[in-house]
Image (cartoon, rainbow, N blue to C red):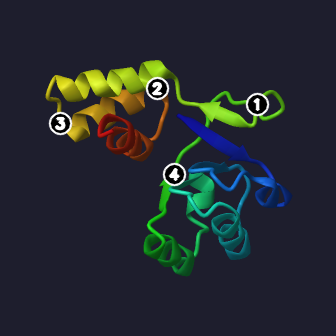
């Protein structure tokens, strides 16, 4: 599973229309979010750093809800954009989630443990749990 890291407004319009998970490494305006949704019609998740989450307007939150796009808080730790434009969620993390699910662990327990071990946000772990493990 890969997260497309976008570090500037200008980059939004060069994205592949099939992107499903995007991390915005800049403070997006309403116009940027609309542009992203327009450029990537299949988008499922927009991830923002914690400091930027507080600046997202209620109208954008409602718009994303209506589009069934999750707005998640989180970071891509240790990722260098100059080396790769994608942050790959290690397969070991996905395997760990599947293993815990098969052991019958609760969703909350999986989110907590995997988030702590992998530095992923619990909401992103929940997304992976629903997306990868269900399929």
| Residue depicted at x 34% and y 21% | 96
Quick one: label 1 or label 4, which is nearer the N terminus?
A: 4
Disc 1: which residue: 84
Q: Disc 2 versus disc 4: distance between alpha carbons?
A: 15 Å
Disc 4: which residue: 73
Residue 116, percent across and down? 40, 28
Disc 3: which residue: 106
Q: Disc 3 versus disc 4: distance between alpha carbons?
A: 22 Å
Q: Disc 1 versus disc 3: distance between alpha carbons?
A: 34 Å
Quick one: label 2 or label 4, which is nearer the N terminus?
A: 4
Q: Disc 3 versus disc 2: distance between alpha carbons?
A: 18 Å
In the image as oriented, which residue stretches furthest toward the left? 104
Quick one: label 1 or label 3, which is nearer the N terminus?
A: 1
Quick one: label 2 or label 1, which is nearer the N terminus?
A: 1
Image quadrant occupied by the C terminus: top left
Q: Is residue 121 visible?
A: yes
| Residue sitting nearer the eye, 15 or 127 | 15
Residue 44, percent across and down? 50, 56
């Amino acid at each position: 599973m890969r997260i497309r890291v976008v570090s500037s407004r200008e980059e939004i319009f060069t994205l592949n229309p099939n992107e499903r998970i995007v991390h915005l490494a800049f403070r997006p305006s309403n116009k940027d979010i609309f542009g992203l949704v327009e450029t990537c019609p299949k988008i499922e998740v927009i991830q923002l750093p914690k400091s930027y989450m507080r600046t997202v307007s209620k109208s954008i939150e409602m718009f994303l809800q209506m589009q069934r796009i999750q707005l998640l808080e989180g970071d891509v730790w240790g990722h260098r954009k100059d080396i790769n434009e994608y942050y790959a969620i290690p397969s070991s993390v996905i395997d760990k989630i599947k293993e815990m699910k098969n052991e019958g662990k609760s969703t909350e327990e999986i989110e907590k443990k995997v988030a702590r071990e992998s530095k992923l946000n619990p909401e992103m772990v929940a997304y992976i749990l629903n997306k990868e493990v269900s399929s």
